[in-house]
Image (tube, rainbow, N blue to C red):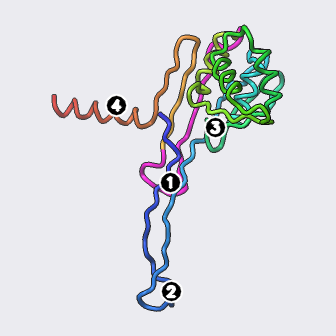
Amino acid sequence: MQPEHRLSPSISFNPEPGSVPGFALLEADMADYFSPTVIPEIIPNGDMTKLELLLLSHMFDAGTDGDGTYFHSWQGPSDLIWVNRAELSAALDEACGSGSQVRNHVEEKLKNAAADDTSVDLDMSAVSWEVILQDIVRRSAKLRYITVTTAFTCSKMRADGFGGMALFITADAIKGCSTTEFLSDCLADIAGQEGG
């Protein structure tokens, strides 16, 4: 549902003012796409395993708020992260028996890492942060849900560069809706009315 970071080069030749006729300056018209994301709920630290807190703190920016953590990211959550090996090993041991879906994924990645690496690179696209958040809700005595709001923005005013989405994560389901889906539903309603 979330758009990829895309670079859309559109090459144009623009003559430099006062330049020699017949010569042109190559100019790349590129845009950067971002997905600023906020999790409004403060997640109690006691509801997360040390492994989940460690991973989420690398995937998002994390701020301490009392006995909990506020997760957000101005660019969008990261799928590829680098984690200190010693911290990761300690957090992995502590998460044993927690029912965390991410634990097996991380354990496998750690086994395949070179023995002398002090940090481990983890591709978290297979076990997403949404799954981690759902595991937290399942175990939590306080949280019945976690909401996530994402804006899609672009460094240039391109028609495909803006929008957003919202997620509603409970123990039983992860529900989401994007602005594109909302507008598609509206267009389908109009098409149905015109055809009827």
Q: What residue is rendered at 18% in x and 34% in y?
A: 194
Q: Position of residue 107 (x, y in %)?
A: 69, 21
Label 3, residues with CA under 10 Å away: few <14, some 14-19, many ≥20: few
Above or below for 3 versus 31: above
Quadrant containing the C terminus in the rendered view = top left
Q: Which comes before the other along the chain, label 3 or label 1?
A: 1
- Read off the residue under disc 3: 80
The label number, if any, that marks residue 17 in the structure image: 2
Above or below for 69 versus 103: below
Above or below for 5 versus 136: below
Is residue 92 inside the magenta stretch?
no
Depth-wise, is mark 4 or mark 2 nearer the camera? 2
- Read off the residue under disc 1: 7
Q: Position of residue 112 (x, y in %)?
A: 67, 28
Look at the numbered discs 3 and 1 and tell me whether their residues touch, using CB distance below 8 Å. Answer: no
Q: Which comes before the other along the chain, label 4 or label 3?
A: 3
Q: Which comes before the other along the chain, label 1 or label 2?
A: 1
Q: Which comes before the other along the chain, label 4 or label 2?
A: 2
Depth-wise, is mark 3 or mark 1 nearer the camera? 3
Q: Secondary structure at mark 4?
A: helix
Q: Secondary structure at mark 1?
A: loop
Q: CA distance from mark 1 to mark 4?
A: 28 Å
Q: Which comes before the other along the chain, label 2 or label 3?
A: 2
Q: Quadrant of residue 78?
A: top right
Q: CA distance from mark 4 to mark 3?
A: 33 Å
- Read off the residue under disc 4: 185
| Magenta residue span | 141-162
Q: CA distance from mark 3 to mark 1?
A: 18 Å
Residue type at mark 1: give it: Leu
In the image, taking residue 24 as reference, residue 89 lies left or right, namely right
Residue type at mark 3: give it: Leu
Q: Secondary structure at mark 2?
A: loop
